[in-house]
């Protein structure tokens, strides 16, 4: 295989890069050792920042968020729910920060409208009766999976190629240049080479490991953020705590649920990232100060993402003191002329990160082509449409096909939706079909967290000959293990009863407990 640019990392930055380069006419291949948004791009709030969160700590990041948020509303409105947002302070919060907030916003060009406390509570009745201040800002929620898939879809429409479940395991270097990358297919372990003129490392928290394969060192701080998903939508707008950034101070509505978070905990290994019971308790206690209902609501999942932070912390300052800006590294300074790393940043600023990286890539390649991503509308991609909450139920309700039965009752996903997703998935997904379907749909996202739909979808995949042999049990085990990571920390009350029942089904009927710890997921099935 040959390409002009090899992009490593299928998160939103890598996806945005593929789109940017493809629109400039540059041939590129995007690879990821897993699938779309396997890292931080799939483990965040889904918040499109107005920038107001950073006005006190990082004015440059605040301005970038404001400008890029406006751009994304123009080019990808179908990925965004323009909810608006509130910053609210409660009794006991730092009143000097509250007083400074409007001026800090004005300095970064961020509109912030002061609201009467009664008006704010009328807008969002779930807010605490201990409110002392409120401001309206232009926050919104964004579907990060749809956003990445739509970027990839437009890139592929202009000739780019996407290879999920494909890991870079080495490079062939000659005279200070990468001549080829050695890739391994996760499905069958086969290794092959891709000859390339330029390599861009957009591997997020794993960027240091990828860079080390070619020699350069990239020092990152791994900051774990844990979040909770409520069973129902608590507020119509994004609600932020009006204080310097800390734990559990953002509640983001998305579809029929709300997402509460987040923490910031230093971890040594990005592969060892999972939520804990202590973090869940802390998030609920802190969040309930601004929205008391969070103390009594049912949570259906906890999850964690790793922020790849590039920079140093001062003694006692913690990871929140590290800039949320991005770093673009030209490894020519490290003796590898055709190797670039892009890391850090935020979901909201991904397009800007991609633009700056693509500018550098084109300069190295001698390509004279301007960036078109800010002015080019990004059409919805068929392969990402089913991540939208409520779309699958509307499809089923309009169906006249009596055989188009429901496979996921929580999210009302039918057989025809699964068939549509399978048709649009890349060919590299065999062995990971159920996980890839879950990323591209609402399957496994409801209260049962895949407990029942995993069985039904697997059965349908057998019926349609998409999978065969013992592949179904192996895929169910991997899918349910991934969902279990998010269920374990919230097992109390009804969730615990549900988990006990599901254990009886999965283990008693299918023997899915047979997978050895740290094994390959095949067990003795």
Image (cartoon, helix red, strand yellow):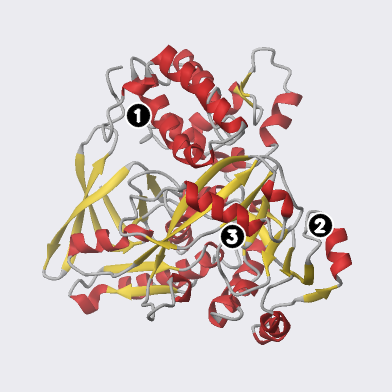
- Looking at the picture, how far across and down is residue 491, in whole percent? 53, 36
Residue at numbered disc 2: 124
Decide if residue 487 is on the left or right side of residue 165.
right
Question: Quick one: label 1, few (<14), some, or many (20+) residues within 10 Å?
Answer: some
Q: Secondary structure at mark 3?
A: loop
- Looking at the picture, how far across and down is residue 4, in whole percent? 31, 59
Residue at numbered disc 3: 248
Disc assigned to residue 431? 1
Q: Earlier in the sequence, mark 3 or mark 1?
A: 3
Q: Please state which of the two labelled residues, at mark 2 or mark 1, is closer to the viewer.
A: 2
- Looking at the picture, how far across and down is residue 207, in whole percent? 31, 61
Q: Secondary structure at mark 1?
A: loop
Q: Is residue 286 visible to us here?
A: yes
Foreground pick, 57 / 377: 57
Question: Quick one: label 2, few (<14), some, or many (20+) residues within 10 Å?
Answer: some
In the displayed structure, 32 sits above or below 410; it is below
Q: Is residue 377 visible to us here?
A: no
Q: Please state which of the two labelled residues, at mark 3 or mark 1, is closer to the viewer.
A: 3
Q: Earlier in the sequence, mark 2 or mark 1?
A: 2
The residue that appears at 62% across and 59% down in the rendered structure is 286
- Looking at the picture, how far across and down is residue 518, in whole percent? 27, 35
Q: Earlier in the sequence, mark 3 or mark 2?
A: 2
């Amino acid at each position: 295989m040959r390409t002009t640019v090899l992009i490593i990392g299928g998160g939103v930055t890598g996806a945005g890069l593929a789109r940017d380069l493809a629109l400039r006419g540059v041939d590129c291949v995007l690879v990821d050792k897993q699938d779309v948004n396997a890292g931080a791009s799939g483990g965040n709030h889904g918040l499109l920042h107005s920038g107001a969160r950073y006005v006190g700590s990082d004015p440059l990041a605040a301005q970038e968020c404001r400008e890029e948020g406006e751009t994304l509303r123009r080019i990808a409105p179908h990925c965004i729910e323009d909810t608006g947002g509130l910053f609210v302070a409660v009794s006991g919060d730092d009143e000097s920060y509250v007083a400074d907030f409007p001026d800090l916003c004005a300095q970064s060009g961020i509109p912030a409208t002061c609201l009467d406390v009664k008006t704010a509570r009328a807008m969002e009745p779930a807010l605490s009766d201990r409110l002392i201040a409120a401001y309206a800002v232009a926050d919104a929620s964004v579907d990060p999976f749809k956003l990445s898939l739509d970027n990839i879809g437009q890139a592929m429409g202009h000739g780019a190629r996407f290879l999920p479940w494909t890991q870079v395991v080495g490079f062939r270097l000659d005279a200070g240049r990468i001549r080829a990358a050695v890739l391994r297919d996760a499905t069958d372990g086969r290794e092959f080479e891709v000859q390339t003129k330029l390599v861009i490392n957009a591997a997020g928290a794993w960027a240091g490991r990828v860079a080390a394969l070619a020699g350069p060192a990239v020092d990152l701080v791994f900051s774990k953020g844990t979040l909770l998903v409520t069973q129902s939508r608590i507020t119509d707008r994004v609600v932020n705590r009006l204080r310097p950034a800390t734990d559990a101070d953002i509640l983001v509505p998305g579809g029929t649920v709300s997402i509460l978070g987040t923490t910031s905990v230093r971890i040594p290994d990005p592969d060892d990232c999972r939520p804990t019971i202590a973090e869940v308790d802390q998030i609920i206690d802190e969040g309930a100060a601004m929205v008391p209902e969070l103390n009594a609501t049912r949570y259906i999942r906890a999850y964690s993402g790793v922020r790849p932070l590039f920079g140093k912390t001062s003694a006692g300052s913690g990871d929140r003191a590290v800039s949320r800006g991005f770093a673009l590294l030209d490894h020519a300074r490290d003796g590898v002329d055709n190797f670039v790393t892009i890391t850090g940043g935020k979901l909201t600023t991904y397009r800007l990160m991609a633009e700056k990286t693509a500018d550098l890539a084109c300069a190295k390649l001698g390509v004279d082509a301007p960036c078109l991503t800010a002015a080019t509308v990004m059409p919805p991609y068929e392969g990402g449409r089913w991540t939208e909450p409520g779309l699958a139920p509307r499809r089923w309700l309009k169906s006249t096909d009596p055989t188009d039965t429901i496979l996921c009752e929580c999210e009302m996903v039918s057989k025809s939706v699964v068939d549509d997703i399978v048709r649009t998935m890349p060919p590299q997904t065999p062995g990971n079909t159920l996980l890839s379907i879950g990323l591209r749909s609402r399957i496994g996202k409801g209260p049962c967290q895949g407990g029942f739909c995993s069985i039904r979808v697997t059965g349908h995949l057998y019926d349609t000959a998409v999978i065969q042999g013992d592949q179904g049990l192996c895929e169910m085990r991997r899918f349910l293990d991934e969902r279990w990571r998010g269920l374990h920390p919230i097992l109390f009350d009804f969730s615990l009863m549900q988990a006990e029942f599901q254990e009886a089904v999965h283990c008693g009927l299918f023997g899915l407990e047979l997978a050895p710890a740290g094994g390959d997921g095949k067990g003795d099935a």
